[in-house]
């Protein structure tokens, strides 16, 4: 069997080192845990409400530019940013 060299970033290398040192534990009931996490993800990401807001053209342009840099549609970028804000993962600077 031929070995191939993996190009791993620092985070991936740390995960590999932790795995090799036995830092990870198997999940007791993996299928049940997986099903629960999938359902939680579906519920979290489900967009079931529509809103209309008015913002300045300048702010919209900046949001569209940032979304383009991230490679996502601007409405998805706005929804993601709002979600991060209300979940406490996005903090105001200043």
Image: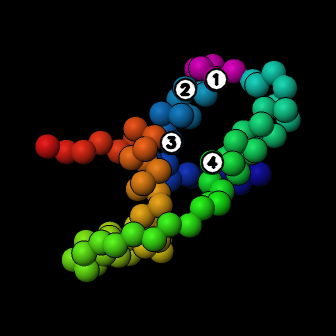
Residue 64 in percent (x, y) is at 35, 76
Report the span colored magenta: 21-25
Residue sitting at x 85%, y 35% = 31
In the image, which is nearer the foreground, mark 4 or mark 1? Answer: 4
How many marks overall? 4
Label 2, label 4: how many angstroms apart (C-alpha)?
A: 30 Å
- Secondary structure of the residue carrying numbered label 1: loop
Magenta stretch contains residue 22:
yes
- Residue 61 makes an appearance in the image: yes
Residue 10 in percent (x, y) is at 41, 42
Question: Is tag 3's residue or tag 1's residue first in the polypeptide sequence?
Answer: 3
Residue 20 in percent (x, y) is at 60, 26
Residue placed under numbered mark 3 in the picture = 12
- Secondary structure of the residue carrying numbered label 4: helix
Badge 1: residue crowd in 10 Å (few <14, some 14–19, many ≥20): few
Question: Is tag 4's residue or tag 3's residue first in the polypeptide sequence?
Answer: 3
**Please, what is the dominant secondary structure of the magenta stretch?**
loop
Q: Which mark is residue 18?
A: 2
Residue 78 in percent (x, y) is at 42, 64
Q: Are marks 2 and 4 in contact (CB under 8 Å)?
A: no
Magenta stretch contains residue 26:
no
Residue sitting at x 75%, y 24% = 26
Residue placed under numbered mark 4 in the picture = 44
Q: Is residue 72 left or right of residue 55?
A: right
């Amino acid at each position: 069997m031929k070995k191939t060299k993996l190009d791993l970033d620092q985070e991936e290398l740390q995960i590999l080192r932790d795995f090799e040192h036995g830092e990870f534990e198997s999940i007791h009931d993996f299928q049940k845990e997986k099903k629960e996490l999938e359902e939680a993800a579906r519920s979290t990401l489900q967009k079931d409400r529509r809103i209309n807001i008015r913002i300045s053209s300048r702010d919209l342009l900046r949001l569209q530019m940032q979304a383009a840099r991230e490679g996502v549609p601007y409405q998805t970028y706005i929804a993601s940013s709002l979600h991060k804000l209300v979940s406490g993962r996005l903090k105001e600077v200043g």
